[in-house]
Image (tube, coloured by chain):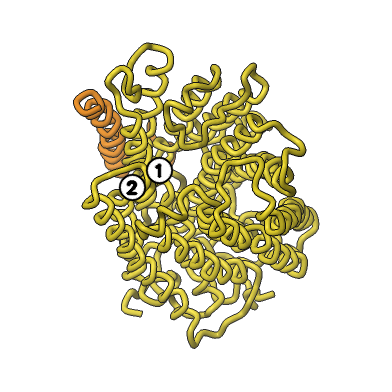
Amino acid sequence: MATHAAEHSHDDHAHDDHDHKPHGFINRWVFSTNHKDIGTLYLIFSFTMACIGAAFSGVIRTELMKPGLQFVQPYFFNQMTTMHALVMIFGAIMPAFVGLANWMIPLQIGAPDMALPRMNNWSFWILPFAFTMLLSTLFMPGGAPAGGWTMYPPLAIQGGNSVAFLVFSVHLMGISSIMGAINIIATILNMRAPGMDLLKMPVFVWSWLITAFLLIAVMPVLAGAVTMLLTDKYFGTSFFNAAGGGDPVMFQHVFWFFGHPEVYIMILPAFGIVSEIIPTFSRKPLFGYQAMVFAIASIAFLSFIVWGHHMFTVGMPLGGELYFMFATMLIAVPTGVKVFNWVSTMWGGSLSFETPMLWAISFVILFTIGGFSGLMLALVPADFQYQDTYFVVAHFHYVLVTGALFAIIGAIYYWWPKWTGKMYNETWAKVHFWWSVVFINILFFPQHFLGLAGMPRRIPDYNVAFADWNLVSTIGAYGMFLTPIMMFAILWQSKKSGAPATMHVWEASHGLEWTVPSPAPFHTFATPPLIHDEDLAHGDITH
Amino acid sequence: MTSTHANQQQRAGIRRTAWIVGGIAFGMFVLFIVKQFIWH
């Protein structure tokens, strides 16, 4: 375990970090305005939602273990696919990144807290209500939403009153995300310590600044689209009702104008995390810092002009299909820059393979697999074959699980000692990693074969020709279900009886977050830190 | 909705940033509702 050999006794700006925690559970957690506590709340919420979403996927994979209907009725199966997606996207992945942003952005830019701490509290506490509302639909007559997370009309509004619950919970999630994004932008643009120039900020902070603008631009569009769904169902409008002069395809355009940037909202912070971890364990500055920042910005820009690639088979003019195909393939350029730079950072470095580094390297490899299958799907003629097959399911799970989720887990193992002041059991953490990386590939890789062979997605039953790989995939899923338990046990043991962490935690860690004691005190940087460029990961951008 | 930690100078900047960014968000919402009425 790489730890800093010599603990600095006390840094020059921690002297005013008095521990003024609010008294009492309610005051501390329900009325919290502290960025660290709110970050913790987000992460706990996200973990809870991930477990619920995993339970839904358990129903899906169990039903698909063998051909034929075994355990659930098709309508309930459809509810599971819909709820699994909604819970994982809006309840697990996004709040996890917001939790990491809350914890780390003020620490990384030398700010005492988020710019709008009370709004921060509100952003978080909306979420449990939103998801209680969404999950309650499972117990309603008619059940939960079953038309897919994409909510395409007319299918999505033909369900029961779960539609209204879904729409209102999406509104609440949107409000939470928009307030969170406003807070992050206001914090980064106004609260940086003197000397923390924009192009000296850690890449994680940059990735979140850009992500927050994506959220600001697209969450209101989703809110508008679902509001129109609501009025179509309950107030007699015909925005998406062809019989009344509306256009159901228009919903798809509006939804994917939100939906594609949403995909990048879930991956750009992951890029930031990996750009923090790899330099630390390569003992080298990040290769091409500025190129990394511009690549994130380019990907964000491109994400707004490629939504049509989700709709190739819906029908659009040939010129439109060609445009969306080429624009989509353009994204491979900045993404390639990033992968090249991560590899170049490791190249010639003095590498060590602590747990966070293992997650980061697996991210680079496995996310790239997801990127390549995305490139295949971007080809219009090929997409006509792949569309609505398990190939698409394999593609986006490589991007979102081995991409976004692996980066989140890597980030937790990377910053956990700073948060808690405790190290975790490195051997068990590595077992957790290897177990996950083996079973996730057993789970999702065969789905490429199933898709290419023609197995459709969103079905509870299938042709016997697909039986073998479905069984393999389900075995992978059952292996993966042990990983949250494993991770919980590792972190619980660390919190209870882990070895104390040093201030720097990792031998080659750079950045302001490593200049405060471990655990990070309740209040940090009450007076702005004196910034020495050599303390920063990117203090000298001429590297 | 002011900050408990930011200094006086930062507060003005935070307020300005929050209104601009919030305005963009609200603008996108209105834009898409209006667009939908014109082109649906």
Where, by quadrant of the figure, is residue A405 drawn? bottom right
Q: Position of residue A356 (x, y in %)?
A: 61, 67
Q: Residue at x 33, y 63 (%)?
A: A329
Q: Is residue A476 above or below residue A170?
A: below
Q: Residue at x 33, y 65 (%)?
A: A295
* Badge 2 vs badge 1, beta-carbon distance below 8 Å: yes
**Which colour denotes chain B?**
orange
Q: Amino acid at mark 2?
A: Trp
Q: Nearer the viewer, residue A342 or A451?
A: A451
Q: Amino acid at mark 1?
A: Gly
Mark 2 lies on residue = A307
Question: Is A392 placed left or right of A382 in the picture?
Answer: right
Q: Nearer the viewer, residue A525 or A60?
A: A60
Mark 1 lies on residue = A259
Do we see residue A383 in this rendering? yes
Q: Residue at x 40, y 59 (%)?
A: A382
Q: Nearer the viewer, residue A530 or A373?
A: A373
Q: Please, what secondary structure does the residue beneath circle 1 have?
A: helix
Q: Please, what secondary structure does the residue beneath circle 2 have?
A: helix
How far apart in space, not on screen, are marks 2 and 1 (Cα)?
8 Å
